[in-house]
Every structure is written in C-alpha cells, then in structure tokens.
Amino acid sequence: MEFLNLALTFPTVIFSALLLVVMLFWLITLIGFADIDMFESDLELDVDASQSSGLSSWFSMGFGGIPITVSISLVVMSSWLISIYAHKFFAYLLGDGIWFYIFGVLMLVACLLIAIPVAAIISRPLQRFFSSAETSKSSDLLGLECVVVTGKVTNTFGQARVKFQGTEQLLEVRTENDEQFTSGDTAVLLEHLKEQHSYIITAKPW
C-alpha cells in the first residue's frame, strides 16, 4: 500500500502518468499500430532547423543514436524509480500548503536531471544493436528475405526482421503498388530509401 500511495501522490504521480503513456505506446507498438522510429524524422528536422542546440546534441550523443522512443522510455522509467525513493525518504522536506507544491516541482526537476545520465548509462548495452542495424542499411541487404513483424505494412509504416551475417535485425519497411502484407508474411527487400531510413519490400517471386 505504501508503494501505491507514493506512486499515486504528488510529485511522483506525474512520472507515474508518463510511465503509463510509455507503457501504452509500447503496447501499441507490439500490436503493430505504432513505429519505434516514428518520431525520428521529425526530430532530425527540428535539430537541423535549430542548428543542433546544445541540449539536443548533448542528449543525442549521450544516448549513442538509439531511437528517441527508447531514450525517452528509459528516462521516464529512471525518473519514476528515482522519484519513488526520493518521495519515500525526503517527503518530510516537502512541507505543507504552497510549499508542498513548490518543493514537489523542485523534486521532479531534480529527479529528471539525475535520471538522464542514469538512463544514458543503462542504454549503453543497447547501442550496439541499433548501430549495427544502421550500418547494415545499404545495398548489401537488397534481395534478402525478411519477415514482417507489424500488423500491416503501408507506404508510411511497417517493420520486418532480416537475417544478415548471422544476426537478426529489425528494419523499417514500406510497400508500393498497394501490396498487402501482414505479420508473419515473407517478403524481399527491393529498394533502400536512404532519406526515409527504410526499405521497399515486395512479394517473393518464387
């Protein structure tokens, strides 16, 4: 009960709500209605437009180029855990009345600032998976078979797994000519779309 009370009261409840959003996003992604890289193109445009501000460039370097959805998820989870313990051991510092909310906001900010480097450290073992997948997005993969893992594939959405050099990688895939693919279907990587960081797939000719 104490754990629930901490998680559902201010200030920790803010991170609890964000954690719920993160969990819902990954559930939707597993079902196949969202994309792990769905915010990457918008983020790249924002960074280019702002000439890579200090905070955004530091954030990108700290997380080694892993998808922003993964980075944010790690930060939210780390913030939530840190806030739980901070709330438990330092609740007596929050005071009463307006001071309760003022110090509560300060605690939120402090937990977030601590969580960012913690999440960056946690992400390091994951970076090699995303970096190896990125280096393989080239003509070397064209013609290989892949297995669709999302519920559908369209001209703007879809993911598939492909085996390359003994490892299995998750790629962004797209379709043309209204070809229909569902989870578990086998297709062939036909064309690499460099700007979209994805591949056009087509049905196997055999």
Image: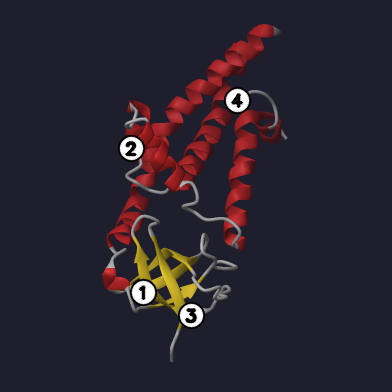
Q: Is residue 144 or residue 193 the one in the foreground?
A: 193
Q: Decide which of tag 4 and tag 1 comes sooner along the chain.
A: 4
| Residue receiving disc 3 | 186
Q: Decide which of tag 2 and tag 4 comes sooner along the chain.
A: 2
- Rendered residue at 37%/28% (across/down): 55
Q: Is residue 59 visible in this depiction of the protein?
A: no
Give the amino acid type for the residue marked by disc 1 in the picture: Lys
| Residue receiving disc 1 | 163
Q: Is residue 113 or residue 178 the one in the foreground?
A: 178
Density class for disc 1 (Cα within 10 Å; few <14, some 14-19, many ≥20) is: some
- State which mark lies toward you, 4 or 1: 1
Give the amino acid type for the residue marked by disc 2 in the picture: Gly
Give the amino acid type for the residue marked by disc 3 in the picture: Thr
Mark identifier at residue 88: 4
User: What is the C-alpha distance between the residues marked 3 and 1?
Assistant: 12 Å
Density class for disc 4 (Cα within 10 Å; few <14, some 14-19, many ≥20) is: some
User: What is the C-alpha distance between the residues marked 3 and 2?
Assistant: 36 Å
| Residue receiving disc 2 | 62
Dot 1: element = strand
- Rendered residue at 58%/68% (across/down): 152
| Residue 140 in the image: above or below residue 121 | below
- Rendered residue at 55%/28% (across/down): 83
Residue 133: give x, y in percent of width and height.
Answer: 33, 61
Residues under numbered marks 3 and 1 in contact, where contact means CB atoms less than 8 Å apart: no
